[in-house]
Amino acid sequence: QAQLVESGGGVVQPGGSLTLSCAASGFMFNVATMSWYRQAPGKEREFVATLNSVGNRKNYADSVRGRFIISRDNAKKTVALQMNNVEDADTAVYYCQAKIGSATSWGQGTQVSVSS
């Protein structure tokens, strides 16, 4: 059974940096497209970043492009989201997603709060 466990969330000041990590197990990580989504209070879950299985194709939401970096380590079965120059609008629960074909799995999420 696929399992995704996010970590690294917390409180960060505006302009600061934070790195989230997602540990995967129970599926063929090296063929999965891995993505990060987030859900702010009172809002729909939204796409943040995605990375293909071999790590050479990335895409970002316009709101985070140039500030966030997605990466993966297929040997360790982890995917990371480096968040730089964070803004108040980045406050949300961040979710890791794995997708293989039509099969999708989600983690439980990790809270990121941007506050001075």
Image (spheres, rainbow, N blue to C red):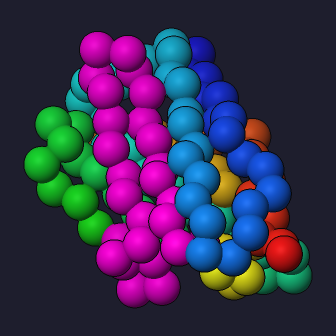
Q: At 64% across and 80% down in the image, what residue appears?
A: 87
Which residue is more in the foreground, 14 or 109? 14
Q: Nearer the viewer, residue 38 or 32?
A: 38
Quadrant for residue 43, please give it: bottom right
Give residue 44's position: percent from left, percent from top: 72, 78
Expressed as whole percent of the image width and height from the top left, the position of residue 103 reads: 44, 40
Q: Is residue 75 left or right of residue 27?
A: left
State the residue at coordinates (55%, 34%). Answer: 22
Vertical arrangement, residue 93 with respect to residue 100, above or below: below
Q: Say which quarter of the image contains residue 69.
A: bottom left
- 62 versus 93 height, above or below: below
* Residue 77 versus residue 48 in the image, above or below: above
Q: Is residue 68 or residue 52 the one in the foreground?
A: 68
The span picked out in magenta is 60-86
Q: Is residue 94 left or right of residue 11?
A: left
Residue 65 lies in the magenta stretch: yes
Residue 100: in sight, yes or no? no
